[in-house]
Image (cartoon, rainbow, N blue to C red):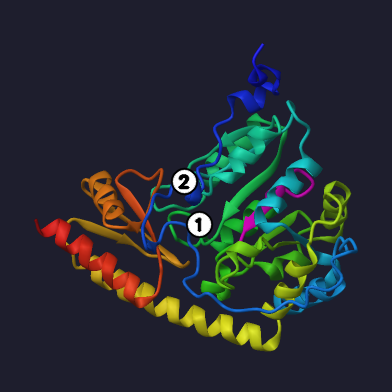
Amino acid sequence: MSIEKLAREQVQALTPYQSARRIGGSGDVWLNANESPFDNAYTVSGQGLNRYSSCQPDALINAYADYAGVATNHVITTRGADEGIDLLLRAFCEPNQDSVLICPPTYGMYAVSAENQGIATTQVPLTADWQLDMAGIDSALEADANIKLIFVCSPNNPTGNLINRDDIETLLTRTQDRAIVVLDEAYIEFSPEATCTDLLARFENLAILRTLSKAFALAGLRCGFTLASPAIINLMLKVIPPYPVPVPVADIAEQALSEAGLARMKYQVLDLTANRAYLQAGLSMLPGVEVHPGFGNYLLITLDDADAVFARLGRAGMIVRQTAVANSLRISIGNRDECEKVLAFIRQQLSE
């Protein structure tokens, strides 16, 4: 018997999430993972490493609660927002019984994490304008009484659009005492006016995913947060592994959330927003290219022969991302030099 046959059936059949690093390639212009181009420096004392860290460091929880404008008992910190997804699944879904609902095209880890735990996934695709299909969601909820989590991403990855707030409120109302609506706000710093944190006071069935990976330029830190009612937070704390926040991670995250750190983040967001506008304007002028409005730190474009353009970019050392949207490329917003290089290269390819 092979070792693989000893594994759980779900794991044997599982297709792992195709992360940017797993399928990236080689090059010097990395615009495929929605990372920040800013390599900010931090210092850590290196002391206290002989002791286990606190499960939920008070200083870190206080700092993020202040930043998000919520009470501390509405916050849990995790190893990236991805662990928040995993904890919600563990807390609310019975394997081989319950299910989750996703609205593709969207972030792939919702389905991968569910499948890994033996939890079925119901798909209700977004509408043609990439909004929630409310009638389709209603039908899915009626057909499956075991849907426990509904994942919504806004700004949505990979399409870049914001989900209508009225639809989110309607969904929360319809699912009270029935399911948790998990709103992924990983990119909310690029559209802060669209946050739904204020809805936490009205809806106990809302959980909001946040991260320091994008606007805070800390993808390598693996520090995320979930904002939710105390009831949800307490259930997540029951299933979180011990000592989830390394001491250096808490130290750096607290620096990023300090007054100076927040000021730097906001300045860098403004810079990236300007670069997004520059890239959007330039790409929009190219024949056969449709640039979809973006509200995160990336743009989705559709064009003929996207596969060929993707391959040529890669051979030239410029790594972007292919998506499940037909004939599309997702381009992360880098520094101005990186944006200029990608724009010039695509312009050249389309003119040949």
Residue 258 is tagged as none
User: Of callouts 2 and 1, which one flags the residue occurring earlier in the amino acid sequence?
Assistant: 2
Picture layout, residue 46 above or below residue 286: below
Residue 287 visible somewhere in the drawing: no
* Boundaries of the magenta span: 173-184
**Residue 208, image x and y in percent?**
68, 60
Picture layout, residue 129 above or below residue 56: above
Quarter location, residue 111: top right
**Residue 199, image x and y in percent?**
71, 66
Task: Name which residue lies at 40% across and 53% down.
Answer: 129
User: Disc 1 designates what residue?
Assistant: 156
| Image quadrant where one finds the C terminus | bottom left
**Residue 68, image x and y in percent?**
71, 74
**Residue 159, image x and y in percent?**
43, 55
Type of amino acid under label 1: Asn
- 101 left or right of 61? left
Does the residue at mark 2 contact the one at mark 1 (Cβ under 8 Å)? yes
Type of amino acid under label 2: Pro
Residue 183 located within the stretch drawn in magenta: yes
Residue 268 located within the stretch drawn in magenta: no
For the residue carrying disc 1, how many other residues have a C-alpha within 10 Å: few (<14), some (14-19), or many (20+)? many
Of 286 and 321, nearer the camera is: 321
Task: Name which residue lies at 35% across and 77% down.
Answer: 336
Whole-angstrom CA distance, mark 2 to mark 1, is: 8 Å
User: Disc 2 designates what residue?
Assistant: 105
- 247 left or right of 158? right
- 26 left or right of 116? left
Picture layout, residue 329 above or below residue 248: above
| Image quadrant where one finds the N terminus | top right
